[in-house]
Each structure stands twice: as C-alpha cells, then as structure tokens.
Image (spheres, rainbow, N blue to C red):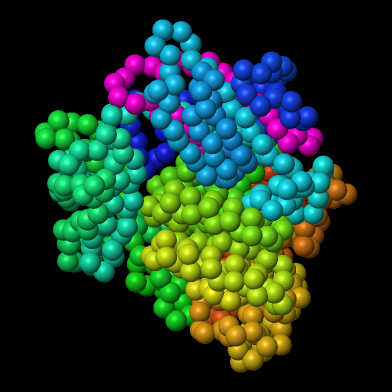
Amino acid sequence: MTDFMYPRPQLVRDNWTSLNGTWSFAFDDEHRYHLPADPIEWTHQIKVPFAPEAKASGIGDTGFHKVCWYRREFDPGVGEGRVMLHFGAVDYSARVWVNDILVAEHEGGHTPFSTDISAALRGDGGAQVLTVQVIDDPADLAKPRGKQDWLLEPHSIWYPRTTGIWQTVWLEHVAATYIRALRWTPYFDGFEIGCEILAAGDLEEDLMVEVKIWHGEVLLADDIYKLVGQEANRKIALSDPGIDDSRNEMLWSPERPTLLDAEVTLRYRGQLLDTVKSYTALRSVNINRDRFMLNGRPYPLRMVLDQGYWPDTLMTAPSDEALRRDVELAKAMGFNGVRKHQKIEDPRYLYWADKLGLLVWEEMPSAYRFSSRAISRIVREWTEAIERDYSHPCVIVWVPFNESWGVPNLTSTQAHRNAVEALYHLTRTLDATRPVIGNDGWEASATDILGIHDYECDPEKLRAKYEVADPVRTLFDQRRPGGRILTLDGFPHRGQPIVLTEFGGIAFDKSKAKETGTWGYSRAHTEEEFSQLYGSLLKVVNETFMFSGFCYTQFADTFQEANGLLYADRTPKIPLEVISAATRGTRIDVTRI
C-alpha cells in the first residue's frame, strides 16, 4: 500500500509516519514464544501491510499457521505531546509491545485499534522496537472470517486466508489533549450537519472546539462550542440557498458527489491544542413504502457484488490507486453502487467512493458456527465497524448477516432468530439514519429491505418468477429462490423494497484455460454469448417493477470464481461501454466500439 496516503481520511493530521515496509517475521506453529524477550527465530522478512499468504508480502505461504510474530525498529520522530500507534486491521487477535512493554491487545480481524505508546518510548535516542504477536486459528469457525477458507486449498465460494497485519500501520503525534473522534450526521430536511466531537487526554473544563465547513471556496459555517466533559454534540445549520438548483448542487449523490470540507480545532483558553481536517456531505437515505429513497426521491439501485480481493495481495489492495480504480471501474460499468461482500473494506476505498460517487452496502463478515462466543465476537466487531464508517456518505445500508451464515437454523431455532433480530435492532440503535438488512438473501425477519438471492440463469424463467400479479401470495408463499423461504413465519412482507441482491454469476474466460478448475452459476463460451446473456438478464431486472434495485454477481473474477465482469487483474471481459449499456438498461451500437 502506498505510504503517502493518510489511512484515516475523515480525521487527518499532518504529523504522521507510515510503518509499512519491511519487518522481521516468524511463524510460531507450536506456540513456543509468549513474549518478545523470548528467543524468537526471525526466519522471514515480510512487506507490511501484505499478509504472509500474499505473494506481495515476499512470503506467499498459504499453509495453516495459528500464531505468527512481527518485529521492526522505528523512529518516533519529533513532536510534543503523545505518540499514537495505529493499526488499520490485524486478523485476528493481536498483542503489541513497544520496547518489550505491552501497549495494546485487540481482537477482531477487520477493524482498527490505536494506543498511546508515549510511556513505552525510550529517551536515550536509540531505536525503538515494535513487536506484534498474532493469533489466527485457521480452523476456528466461530470467529467472523468472511470468505477466508478453513480448508487448505480454496474451494467453492471461499478464498485464501489472511493472517496478521493487512492494513496500514502508522504513527501519529498528537497534543496532550487531542481530538479522538469525529462523527458527522447529515440532516437533509433541516439542511443541517450534525457534528459530534470526542476529546481525549488531559481533559480541562475550559476546552473549546471550532468547526468550519466549506462548500468549495464558500465558508458555510464557523461555529465555536464548549466541550461538556469530553464531548461536543451540535447541529450546524447550513445556509439554505432556497432555489432547487442551488440546493441540488449542495447534495451528495453518485451523479454529483458534492463533499463539504471541514476543519475542527481544539483550544484551551485560547491556546491551540489540535487541528484536524475532515469532510462530510449532505444527503439522506431512507425507505418509503416499496422504494429506496436518496435525497427524498426514489432511487433505483444498480449495484455489483464486490469481494475486494486481488490475486497477489488478497484482501489488501496493491496500492491506493488500485482502490480508486475499482471505484472508477464500477461506475464505468454503469453501476451506482457496490455491495462489499463479507468484508469491511479499507477506509481509503470508502474515501474514493465518497469522492467519486459510489453507493456502498457494508456487510459484516460471517462466522460459520453458532455459539454465544461467536455472537459476542460479531457484536463487538460490528459495533467497531459502524463506529469507524458511520460518517462516510457513500455507506447507505448495513448488513449484519448474509444467507443465514452463522445462524443456519433460523426456521427452527429461536436463538438463531434472536441473534438476527438483536443485530438488526442494535444496528438501528447505533445508526438510526440508514436502512438495515437483518439477513440478506432469504429467511428474513427484522429488515428494512428484502434482499433476494436467485441465480436462475434463464432470463425468461427469471422474468416469469418476478413478474407476478400477486407477489405476496406467489413469491412469499409459494416460490423458494435458493430453496429457502424468503421470510420467516411471523414476519410477512410488510411492503418493504425488494432488491435482487445476488443474481447472474456468469462464468467466462476467453482463454478457456480456467474452465477446468473454475466455476460460475452459469457459463458462457464466447464474448458474444457472455454479452448476450448478461444483457438479457439485466434487461429482465431493469424492467421488473417489483424490484427497487439489483446487485449483479460479480465485479471481478476471484480465484476459482470466474464469474466476474472483469478478470482478476481488472481487465474487462467485454467492452466497458457494452457492460454499462446493459447495466443501465439502454441500447448501444456495438459496431461503433
């Protein structure tokens, strides 16, 4: 990952240092070591932030390894106040030492953690030593693991494992009293932006915070508040231009992704303590009867399912430019959104989705065994994910469960139902501004949107399924896409929007070299056949009034799954213009391409 891109794009400071690069590394399969002072045999060099399973790490070992160790020396740099150490994501459980002093412990493979390491730094001018132990049991099915396979070789819809550090590690200098968190909430109806500021460190009673917001060069707000305890929570009124055209220029959407720049300054009795840069946006997402609404108007969702993997770097993007390119490619193929599948994506991806205009459904990686411990882990990590990504305007829907994974007995076991309903209500409590899908695909209970997964490959059969006169009786009582009932007993369809959240999955590789070991839900053998089948399926879903939107499977080939619109290296299988026209439900003269 490029070192010069700030890893936390909505709370930015100038004085920071990336610790990505070459670290010492060791597998510890027998769990012989317990402390950094133990005689650890550093057998490898690894390029952080790439996981040891990834070729780009310099190791490329995809075997089973439950424990591993990292070590590097670092210079904390110059700055007053505190030195904070940040990890973007470490899979799964991490213990961190600085100069053999334990400074942090964290469990959860997809969410960040930070710690103040000031007290552990040596003042003798020598190099500081950072050591990390990671425990990531490849056979543990009761932890949120998403698409990471528990078998040695990837099979079916599961992919190589990711062990250890897989997002940026970095240092940051902050004042003794500093801004710990920002939380932005758009209030579309009142033309207001909610701003919640949390301070940390040496808290004083006379702390003041100033918030400035700009639209381009125009200063929209310059407000000063007093912190109560460690918090300030205010609604900031923006100047309402009144005229619809001017109002629309202020709103964020995929077609016009207007971002509002922000600066937040913390002071104590006039003394400057901390300044951070951020951004927000004015937009609303909600449900009105059977339609998804963006900025108060019905908005058809045209999404693509995105696994977020790369061949040589796995869950870590090869560069920041690669993240931007993925957003650009989704838009170039005619989609206005992505469903990030079984992955809490890097914040830099969400930044580019915010900046370039792409909707994102955020989905919790699943565990595959039900237990109280599994649910506790999911609740903790999902809460951290919502806290991390709450302020991104691109995130429009939260999805805590997918296809009953981890809760396989929803039709018969009350505890499994309770888990889905509890996560739905918890999510709605943590964020009342976005719709929530309790369990996407089938067997729905508590949900704001009914997601259906159906890989019927015959376009006319797909049309016959969903162009029905009485969908409540025909679809919900008689039809079973994927062999599952769509709603659980006691949770009839209440008129929520229906979105075909997985369909398609056409496998195609023009070299035909992959056809032996790859698969899709159907297969095309020529570019013409692939283009025709994709166009026919998209014509059906675009014309089916029952649907408020769709999500095609999938964005790019991912290991053994050859059902992407792009190859794994992001090369289009057919011209982007052809894909875009079909996605949008328009026609194109292919002879002009």
Q: How many marks?
A: 0
Residue at image coords 30%, 35%: 201
Q: Quadrant of residue 304?
A: bottom right
- Residue 81 painted magenta: yes
Whether residue 60 is visible here, answered yes or no, is no
The magenta region covers 63-89
Is 57 placed above or below 237 here? above
Query: Residue 77 or 279: which is nearer the viewer?
Result: 77
Q: Position of residue 181 (x, y in %)?
A: 34, 44
Query: Residue 396 or 325: which is nearer the viewer?
Result: 396
Q: Position of residue 413 (x, y in %)?
A: 69, 74
Residue at image coords 54%, 40%: 106
Q: Position of residue 332 (x, y in %)?
A: 53, 52
Q: Quadrant of residue 123?
A: top left
- Residue 29 painted magenta: no
Q: Is residue 565 left or right of residue 124?
A: right
Is 372 placed above or below 206 here? below
Q: Position of residue 43 (x, y in %)?
A: 73, 18
Q: Quadrant of residue 29?
A: top right
Residue at image coords 18%, 36%: 267
Query: Residue 227 or 213: which is nearer the viewer?
Result: 227
- Which residue is situated farthest in the right direction here? 516
